[in-house]
Image: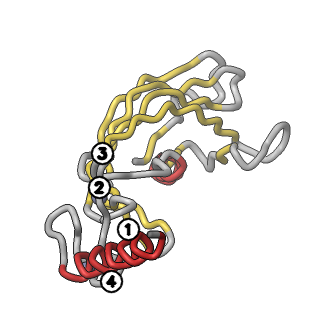
Amino acid sequence: MILNVSKIINVPGASMELSFNKKIDFIELGKDKISLIEPVEFVGEISCTDGKELFLTGKLSTVLELPCNRCLVAVTTPISITINQRFTPDRTDNYNEDTNLIEGTEIDLKPVFIKEIILNIPMKTLCNAHCKGLCSVCGQNLNKEICDCNEELLDERFAILKTLFNGSK
Ligand SMILES: [Zn+2]
Ligand SMILES: [Zn+2]
């Protein structure tokens, strides 16, 4: 995802329209790997307003596969992100950690996009709002099948309820 900006860099008011899609198979996030099941699509523009800095604006979209927070089943999760990124050739002026440095006349958009995707991963992913999760004893996916240990646990609870009920009589 290397973007050559030699035509607009140092040219006040110049801009380039961008539209492309690129496959990124997965993003590493600590020990986890997040799969991208659709190419990363970007539509937008990069412009050089003051003849020095470049501004990248547009919409980035892709489809992630995230584990359900309760049962760990892979959930297809489309995401769409508004991109507003500043690129500067040096660390002077108002450089901060949100600013990207340009080296030469090329910008590698891949790390910029990966960072944005990571920042926009939803906090909560559920395969459906009523997901029953995994059995805490045997790990069975309770959406698919109820396991025996769960029934025992239920029986146990009923037994406790019964004794409580009987005791109050
Ligand atoms: Zn689930
Ligand atoms: Zn179980």
Kindly identify the residue that appears in the image at 32 percent across and 41 percent down: 78
Q: Give the spatial CA distance, label 1 vs label 2.
A: 23 Å
Q: Which mark is residue 131?
A: 2
- At horizontal 15% and vertical 65% (from top left) the residue drawn is 144
Q: Residue furthest right?
A: 93
Q: Is 97 situated left or right of 110 in this image?
A: right
> Cβ(mark 2) to ligand 1 < 8 Å?
yes
Mark closest to the chain's N terminus, 2 or 4? 2
Alpha carbon distance from label 4 to label 1:
26 Å
Q: Position of residue 21 (x, y in %)?
A: 30, 39
Question: Mark 1: which amino acid?
Answer: Lys
Is mark 2 in CB contact (under 8 Å) with mark 3?
Answer: no
Which mark is in front, 1 or 2? 2
Q: Which label lies toward us, 2 or 3?
A: 2
Residue 63 is marked as 3
Q: Which residue position is annotated with label 4?
A: 137
Amino acid carrying mark 4 in the image: Val
Residue 99 at x, y percent in the picture = 69, 43
Q: Find residue 155 and report its image quarter.
A: bottom left
